[in-house]
Amino acid sequence: MTVRQVEEHRESLRDPERFWADAAQAIDWDRPWDRVLDGSNAPFYRWFPGARLNTCWNALDRHVAGGRAEQVALIYDSPVTGQVGRFTYRELRDAVAKLAGALVALGVGHGDRVLIYMPMVPEAVMAMLACARLGAVHSVVFGGFAAAELATRIDDAKPKVILSASCGIEPGRVVAYKPLLDRAIELATAKPSACLILQRAAQPCDLVAGRDRDWREAAAEAAPASCVMVAATDPLYILYTSGTTGNPKGIVRDNGGHAVALRWSMENIYGVKPGETFFAASDIGWVVGHSYIVYGPLLAGCTTVLYEGKPVGTPDPGAYWRLIAEHGVVAMFTAPTAFRAIRRDDPDGTFIRQYDLAKFRTLFLAGERADPATVQWAERQLDRPVIDHWWQTETGWPIVANCAGLGLQPVKHGSATRTVPGYDLCVLGPSGDAMKPGEIGALCVKLPLPPGSSPTLWQAEERYVQAYLADYPGYYHTADAGFIDADGYVYVMTRTDDIINVAGHRLSTGAIEEVLASHPEVAECAVIGVNDALKGQVPLGFLVLKAGAKTDRGVVAAEVVALVREHIGPVASFKMAMVVERLPKTRSGKILRGTMRAIADGESYKVPATIEDPAVLAEIGEHLKGGGFGTGA
Ligand code: COA
Ligand code: AMP
């Protein structure tokens, strides 16, 4: 039997330029490319050099001109405010053009950076598209990050303007964004010249005279701006993601390759046709929100759903099913953690059966490992294909998937199925040799990466090389380990760096350690990710206090929990820290985090031959049995 995904994959690697030139026909270009792929500056590759286009034009204006003006482009569904709003392509285009005009009035133009720190409201989507319209580079920062994290991103991106809102709404509490923004600007060295602030009824805020402007007033007064054509290789956005230190990596996305790849992915990976409704339950602060709430569905002429709520509790575990039924969703994308939460609250699927899901065809899961028990539960309850697929902020779209648009293949639980066309995925051993089928190694993609993948890090080319290209010359190193079986099915097992995945959110344990180490009584610390039934993983901190430390151990533990919330933000879900006498180390002083994780998760482990003092492991075990975590409460 021929498998179309396998054939297309082979074709995409045999003649990548032809493959992607064909896909690029689905995009409107102002000027064609000189060549499809420029490899003259390897290992840096550029797709579609010479071409000019505008991403906002392709996401909005072309659909208005092409017969979709009255089709709904964006549905805003917000159980936390009790609102549902709909914007046709024409309405969204007009609102974006006005907002872009307001940005022009603030001096924003091609290449300027604009930072967006917003809750899940339609204006956040408009903000991204308004930047794209002007050829300005947006950088969206997730609302669950604290002021210090925001300040780091302001200093790196140096935005001319910041777009924000008075508040976000989490179940049971209003999160005042404005004080966080004010504090971040105070902490940052690079000051924006202006801020546009969206006042929300739940909690309006004060504006800083001379710097802040009221969003609605500014947009109402502005003259609509038209699309500025930019080079295909110009940056569309920067999205910061956790690196191995406290300094996040500024993932850069270009305009041309991104538009081509996302447009292609909507039909071929997600099996969604223009005019259909797609729902990605994520946040615009993450790559899933960028690619599959905003750009992918709109580039494809679909209707996209922007959901300001949670999978459970807003008001119940039937929230997703209500959305699917009410808005005619054909395919949905979320993280497995959301399904673990729904399963916990509705184990028998009682809520699922209250809704008419006739139009719903496929559920896609990504962002963390999809545990087979959750996938099987979802399959049983929904009686529809449940597709695990694997990708990263860096790639911007899936590397491994069961491509719904190319004919679904049999599922093997635990595997995200086969490599997606465009990616030459290999499993490499420590010396760079290809591993045999079934053998675990580093998951690497042979260069060049396909269009849409990050061509570099924002103003940090050398860091890009060191982080991704140096370990295996000629390959992009994903920092995930896994294997490919004899049928070509890919199994993604674990990260090989210090990144952990908490409720689908990517966090660096190194960054949390930096915060713990800043406590005056802490001499040494280690943070590991331990298994959690709901969030997949949660961080756990171990602290060694300075000799003669005066503060009570429980108090220090609680204080570091509060510090992490203050410095990184609630998104870190850092609620557990404990004081120990010593940390287990090798004779060369390396902390044995992997062994500590195995002890915490109750797994069997080998005492490493290089350990300095094996007795420390038993001490750690005793501490974990005894509990005594600081909770910060
Ligand atoms: N602004 C401000 N605070 C935010 C926030 C935002 N946009 N998003 C989350 N937070 C806060 C939460 O209120 C919570 O605070 P708390 O410690 O005071 O309770 C904290 O950050 C942790 O949030 P979260 O990890 O989302 O946990 P939760 O307990 O609130 O919810 C789930 C658990 C499983 C319901 C939730 O993680 C979820 O919906 N996941 C869906 C998956 C997803 O969206 N993944 C994104 C990548 S695809
Ligand atoms: P992010 O950049 O936040 O999207 O996180 C990317 C990381 O999440 C990957 O490198 C993996 O470690 C993990 N991840 C994402 N999707 C999957 C998946 N389907 N299976 C296993 N791990 C995944």
Image: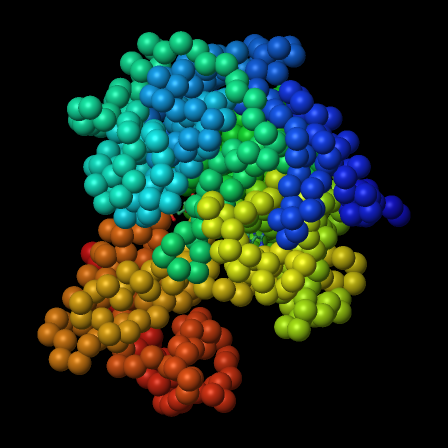
Q: Could you tell me residue 568's position as x and y percent?
A: 31, 51
Q: Could you tell me residue 309's position as x and y percent?
A: 40, 34
The residue that appears at 62% across and 49% down in the rendered structure is 44
Image quadrant in which the C terminus is located: bottom left
Residue 268 appears left or right of 370? right
Is residue 378 something one can see in this rendering? no
Q: How is the image coloured?
A: rainbow
Residue 132 appears left or right of 141? right
Task: In the displayed orientation, state which residue is furthest to the right.
Answer: 1
The residue that appears at 67% across and 44% down in the rendered structure is 450
The residue that appears at 59% across and 12% down in the rendered structure is 64
Residue 349 vertical placement versus 227 (above, below): below
Residue 392 appears left or right of 484? left
Q: Could you tell me residue 501's position as x and y percent?
A: 46, 56
The residue that appears at 24% across and 63% down in the rendered structure is 518
Q: Name the foreground residue: 11 vs 51.
A: 51
Name the quadrant containing residue 591. bottom left
Q: Name the foreground residue: 555 vs 253.
A: 253
Q: How many marks?
A: 0
Is residue 423 something one can see in this rendering? yes
Task: In the displayed orientation, state which residue is furthest to the left.
Answer: 550
Q: Name the foreground residue: 610 vs 326.
A: 610
Name the quadrant containing residue 324. top right
Residue 130 appears left or right of 456? left
Q: Could you tell me residue 485's position as x and y percent?
A: 74, 63
